Amino acid sequence: MATLFGSGIKRREDPRLITGSGTFTDDIKLPGLTFAAMVRSPYAHATIRKIDTAAAAQAPGVIAVITGKDIAGKVGPVPCAFNVPNCDLKLPPHPALATNKVRYVGDAVAMIVATSRAAARDAVDLVDVDYDPLPATVDPEKAVQPGTAQLHDEVPGNVAFTWHVAGGDADQAFAQAAVKVSLRIVQQRLLPTAMEPRSAVASYNKATGQLTLWATSQNPHIHRFLTSVTLGLPEHKIRVISPDVGGGFGSKIPGYADEFLVAYAAMTLGRSVKWTEDRSENYTVTTHGRDHVEYVEMCGTGDGTITGLRTKIHAGLGAYASTAAPGVPTILHGLMYSGAYTIPNVKGTVIGAYTNTTPVDAYRGAGRPEATYLIERLVDCYARRIGMDPALVRRKNLIPADKMPYTVATGITYDSGDYHAALDKAMELIDYRGFRERQEKARKDGHYLGIGVSSYTEICGLGPSQVAGQIGFGGGLYESAIVRVYPTGMVRAYIGTRPHGQGEETTFAQIVADEFGVPIENVEIVAGDTESTPQGWGTYGSRTTAVGGAALKNAAVKVKEKAKKLAAHLLEANEADLEWHDGKFQVKGSPAQAKAFGELALMANVAWNMPAGMEPGLEASAFFDPTNFVFPYGTHIATVDVDLETGEVTVLRYVCVDDCGPHINPMIVEGQVHGGVIQGVGEALQEIAVYSDDGQLMTGTMMDYAVPKASQMPTIESHFTYTPTPVNPLGVKGIGEAGTIGSVPCIVNAVVDALAPLGITHIDKPLTPARVWAAIQQAKGGAR
Amino acid sequence: MIPASFDYVRAKSLRDALNAIGTDGTKVLAGGHSLIPMMRFRLAQPGRLLDIGQLAELKGIDLKGRGARIGAGTSYRELLDSPELAERYPLIAEATRGIGDVQVRNRGTIGGGLAHADPASDMPAVMLALGATFNLRSKGGKRSVAAADFFTGAFTTALASDELLIDIALPAPPKKAGMAYASFEQKASGYAIAAAAAVVTKSRKTITGVTLALTGVGDRAYLADASGAVGSHGDDAALEAAVANVTKGIDVNGDIHASVEYRSHLARVVARRAIALALSRAG
Ligand SMILES: Cc1cc2nc3c(=O)[nH]c(=O)nc-3n(C[C@H](O)[C@H](O)[C@H](O)COP(=O)(O)OP(=O)(O)OC[C@H]3O[C@@H](n4cnc5c(N)ncnc54)[C@H](O)[C@@H]3O)c2cc1C
């Protein structure tokens, strides 16, 4: 049988998902279901004088109006679970329902439970909250300046933490350097915009004390744990189910007040409760991404060797620290300051700030896109300063393949890779030299073309659990899987991760089917229900395949080892004399003497004739805890045409060469790259969440927040090199976030390259026509 | 995204509709693609919707003679499905193709778009450039209003609360006119930051007439003066000069997508581009 590993078969989940046959959380219907709606603050910062719920409580269909007073001592604060050490992290209480003070537009002050969604929504308008508005602060840099509005009494100056990272001696490198370049960079706030908004349904059995919570979750086991902590409910009495999940991009990692409140309401009211946010709510309360104001600098020699990098980062956390928030701009960001290069001296300070805005947490790439972006922008500035082609500067500084595995200045060790090969391939594919010639000609005709390169590596496949402990992550980062073979030879595999669009129902089935030599139709992958799936830490950080896939592979190997022992027993042969061929164990040199996998499945499950001491059944579970992270990498190159008159940027070509090791399913890998690149191009050209100074989200709907549309996106020419990692048995690296990480800087570099003749050295993303035009006017001396 | 509760009635005839309209809290529903979103945000909370979407009296494109008559209830899709209309008024097809997406064009109606009078919507500028007249009716009578007098401000028109827009009368286009629509879109909404509709005539190489309408720029679509182009050959410098003052006297919008200055600049750019394109199609 041909192996499935490496075959670009169509995604098995798609017929279900694209014909409306999936089951999402909001599809859950239960007898006597009630509906919740949240009363949310219209102010970014205000003292609550009084909450009058009387009118709402009497409205038709309303069952309960719950306020912060009602839940005192019953629903704990919303937890933060990434307690980054050595940075004086301050985690002020985050009440599930505000009682004294609201700290961002969308902060919940009351919850309505009613017999219909419409009744609940109508009653929201009847809750009368008397607010005393306070001055707000929304910018992470301004928030920590003296005299700014203070969010939390426990956090003087709004400083959530000050985190340092260093490797080598950056200060000395800068002191001695021939060339220094610096930039102030704003990495704008983004709205993750999963297609499916968040939703939660809870049902509670008073007699058994059993809580069942359906939730849009990337990590149901983490949600079970957080629910247990927040509600004080024993963990074994909680079942969390995340059914089909329509994307998350990080925004469905955190534990939110909403889910805990829904669970609390179900427990106290004795009715099952459903809450589903609408898109406006999704934009105001579901976590945002990025939000950095950065001062960054790079130094090097006059002939193109980069010797140092320094940063000072203001990272906005929003009003409260969301579940993983403190780890994103620190661990997942600062440790990557050498990028794909041999930069020997790095030093960074990250100042986390509380602001009167929606909490910020992981968003596709989580910290690494921000690192890659600042490094790649600086490389271009440095190259321009020394008059060297930016692609050549990259080639000169990339970590050479023969130095792998390579330990960078911050102390982490990159697993494997040939970074130069990816750069060279991308340059050849886009005809880098030829484009430079065309660019030259076009400039003479008054056309502004540009080319931008970005060479990245990123840290993913999170990660060794021991490291998780050291960096303050409130959980493990191993994965586990159970492979269960039925008497008829059909297989169900239970996994601890929660794929939500990435395609592992297909790729994981490919792994298992290959191992057993059975058709893929015989294998079912089960995820998302804590009742049936083993402990896992979820799908994020491009870890599902690199960690969870490895656990699954190991479980399948265990099953096969047992099957082999059974085959030897049934064939009255020595185990060592057996070989695996085409779905059968057969005696070497005597292929007629064989036991097919299906037959072994039956014999193991009926247990009529087991070897002495062997347990009946055919199943195994495995835990996999990697020894290191994995580091996918690559080079992305874009060419652009800038319309000087309007500032409009047109991407002419987009070439990417990524390396994530061998591909289980090349089509799915390519799909991940496409999705990632589109989100990156969106970030580079058009996506931005805008707050007014008084904390109103000005981009609260899709009429103002520019999620990329197909018609606005370039054709993506996706190519690969294939370098396995030694870190896991599959040799695979994560590819879920690489596209976003690699793409943002190459677009911005290309636009700045196009405008270089005007003396433009930097424009903050997103490079909307308005911003590009303004930069052009300024460069032309319009002083506008 | 749940609207406040409301009643719904479907008009069976135009007379039926005219009798019902104007009663307190009643709002006319056509394609619903402007009204329903506003209701879902609870920016509009009408007590009763009067659905005129099924009224045959409001539908259809009549091309008898040299002009045209378009029923207010005609959908954008139906406009695009008429090759004869596109031939006589290519401007309509060019602008309509850029409105919203397939669903919006399938449901949205030309009358709804005009009555809604969104400051950034496309059809008002097209109607101004073509010199349209709007025929209105109430229980008490009929009247006609020129497009130039119809749009009175952001989301406000000459329509009285008991009036319906029945149809749109278009005069014959000037002989051998070239027409063009140029829009610079806001990337999220797809609405125009600034858009221009131009109708240009020429004699040999010389421009003999320019009608220019802009939308997205101020609180309503308006006819702008580009007569400076008349007599020129439409070279860049001449057009540049002709559009230099197209925002004069207009209170130009500034928002998170475009500053006043940038939008004013774009107004000039789309105006020039529309005239140049129309000129290339004239004759
Ligand atoms: C996603 C999206 C994108 C869009 N993009 C664009 C775009 O790019 N450009 C653009 O121009 N528009 C755009 N639109 C708006 C669209 O053009 C309007 O929805 C449509 O034109 C309005 O027509 P309707 O039939 O849907 O009107 P409705 O929403 O039914 O009604 C709109 C208003 O007009 C009134 N009304 C309707 N018919 C009459 C009548 N005959 N007499 C009197 N009053 C009447 C109604 O009472 C209501 O106040 C977009 C809409 C959406 C939802």
Image (cartoon, rainbow, N blue to C red):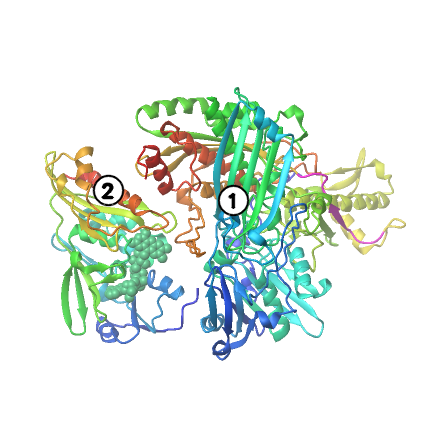
Q: Residue at x 63, y 54 (%)?
A: A219
Q: Which residues are magenta?
A: A615-629
Q: For the residue marked with disc 2, what is the amino acid?
A: Arg
| Residue B111, quarter of the rendered image | bottom left
- Farthest residue, direction top: A303
Q: Secondary structure at mark 1?
A: strand
Q: Secondary structure at mark 2?
A: helix
Q: Is residue A694 above or below residue B267?
A: below
Residue closest to the eye, B8 or B6: B6
Task: Quickly name the residue at label 1.
Answer: A292
Q: Residue at x 42, y 38 (%)?
A: A714
**x, y percent for residue A661:** 63, 34
Asked if labels 2 and 1 touch by Cβ distance under 8 angstroms, the answer is no
Q: Residue at x 19, y 39 (%)?
A: B281
Q: Chain of mark 2?
A: B
Q: Is residue A707 magenta?
A: no
Q: Is residue B98 visible?
A: no
Task: Quickly name the residue at label 2.
Answer: B268
Q: Which secondary structure is most common in the magenta stretch?
A: loop
Q: Quadrant of the N terminus of chain A?
A: top right
Q: Is residue A339 above or below residue B134?
A: above
**x, y percent for residue B190:** 35, 50
Q: Chain of mark 1?
A: A
Query: Which quarter of the frame holds ligand 1?
Result: bottom left
Q: For the residue marked with disc 1, what is the amino acid?
A: His
How many neighbours does mark 2 have within 10 angstroms: few (below 14), some (14-19), or many (20 or more)? many
Estimate the spatial distance between the alpha carbons at disc 1 and disc 2, rounded to whole Å: 36 Å
